[in-house]
Image (cartoon, grey):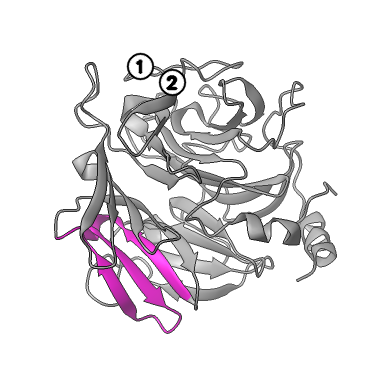
Amino acid sequence: MSTTKLLAAAAAITIVASGPVLANNHGFNSPGNVLIADQFNNRVVEVTPSGEIVWQFGLGPNDVSAKSPIAVNDALRIGTKTLISGTGAPPGTEPLCPNGCADNRVMLVDHRGRILWQYGRFGVSGSAHDQLNTPVQATWTANHTVFITDQGNQRVIEVSLDKKILWQFGVTGVPGGGAHKLNNPNSVEVLDGGQYLIADQSNNRAIVVNRAGHIVQTFTAGGTLNGVAFASRLPDGDTLISDAGNNRIVEVNMSDQIVWSYATNTQSGSNPNPQPTRAVRLRNGDTLISDQFNQRVFTVNPAGQIVRQYGTLNVAGYDTKSVRRALNTPYDAKKIGDYVGLSWSDSLRPNVLRQAP
């Protein structure tokens, strides 16, 4: 689909502006900025390398309306647009709705906070047409389709911009293991050759599935993984995995041997069980980690030294100007312009919508 057709499709279903956008956004979309899904602050923020907020979508922790992405788990910058997964908060995690707050939307948002495209209906949990149940992650493709990890429905689906399901792996609503089922899937990345890397969280594995729906590779780090929150394929063929239940990030080779690891719970004052959710390898070899229950996003070098951190270790907070000291259970972070190991690569950037309609 051409950019013109994509813009037309998006404009045809534009929804009224949802979240606020900060006026001081002169640094918006600058390479090197970091996009953070600030989960229980109900917002996505773009911050400078020093932590100043230059863009925000969502009204913050005191809002659980459709104007905010509730308990947002994932965000990805697409040109000047942002693909956001409004996951929803489980019971006991959101003070404003102790029985849980449903969101169940994947949204494409422009820099002014307008929702240009949406799959799923706010507050509705389901598996019928245009319905989701706890979408935890979304991936944009070069074909202008969207892969959605629909965790509560135990499936990964590919949807078109006109909301047709083009492909699915997993049996809707039926958790399980083996060859055709998933158990709380947590992410999907598109590999070359019509294959997909899926973090199959509660099956403690990362699997590669082909278009025909067959598992062609399985990674378990020698049977040691416990709660796979994310997986990405690195340029050298290794696979980077967020091993949340073991509070570590591991890199495994094609033989499933661990070649690098980093534990996020060893610092003094750390939450003993922070359950890191995202790890993205940067071009310079550092790794950007979302250490959710340690309330921080940080970058660690190959030697295991922290070179930059946002948020205060194990202290939740909210700040409208900066994330240097305050985040609330950050689930995902990506460095703008540096998408090593992710489906969305710099090579795709010229093919996407760049101008706001």
Pinpoint residue 319: horizontal percent, then vertical percent: 54, 15
Q: Is mark 1 on a helix, strand or loop?
A: loop
Q: Residue at x 62, y 66 (%)?
A: 145
Q: Quadrant of residue 133?
A: bottom left
Residue extent of the magenta highlight: 195-222
Image check: 33 left or right of 324? right
- Mark 2 lies on residue: 311
Label 1 close to label 2 by CB (< 8 Å): yes
**Residue identifier under label 1:** 315
Question: Quadrant of residue 307 in the image?
Answer: top left
Q: Which of 257 and 227 is in front in this view?
A: 257
Q: In which quarter of the image is the N terminus?
A: bottom right
Taking the image as shown, residue 261 lies to the left or right of residue 128, namely left
User: Which quadrant of the structure image shows residue 344?
Assistant: bottom right
Toward the viewer: 190 or 88?
190
Q: Which of pointers 1 and 2 indicates the residue nearer the eye?
A: 2
Q: Give the dominant element type of the magenta stretch: helix, strand or loop.
A: strand
Amino acid residing under circle 1: Val
SS type, badge 2 = loop
Q: Give the residue drawn at x 62%, y 45%.
A: 337
At which x and y percent is residue 290? 40, 36
Q: Pinpoint residue 207: horizontal percent, then vertical percent.
A: 32, 67
Q: Residue drawn 21% across and 32% down?
A: 273
The picture places residue 128, in percent across and down from the top left corner, at 51, 67
- Residue 128 visible in this rendered orientation of the protein: no
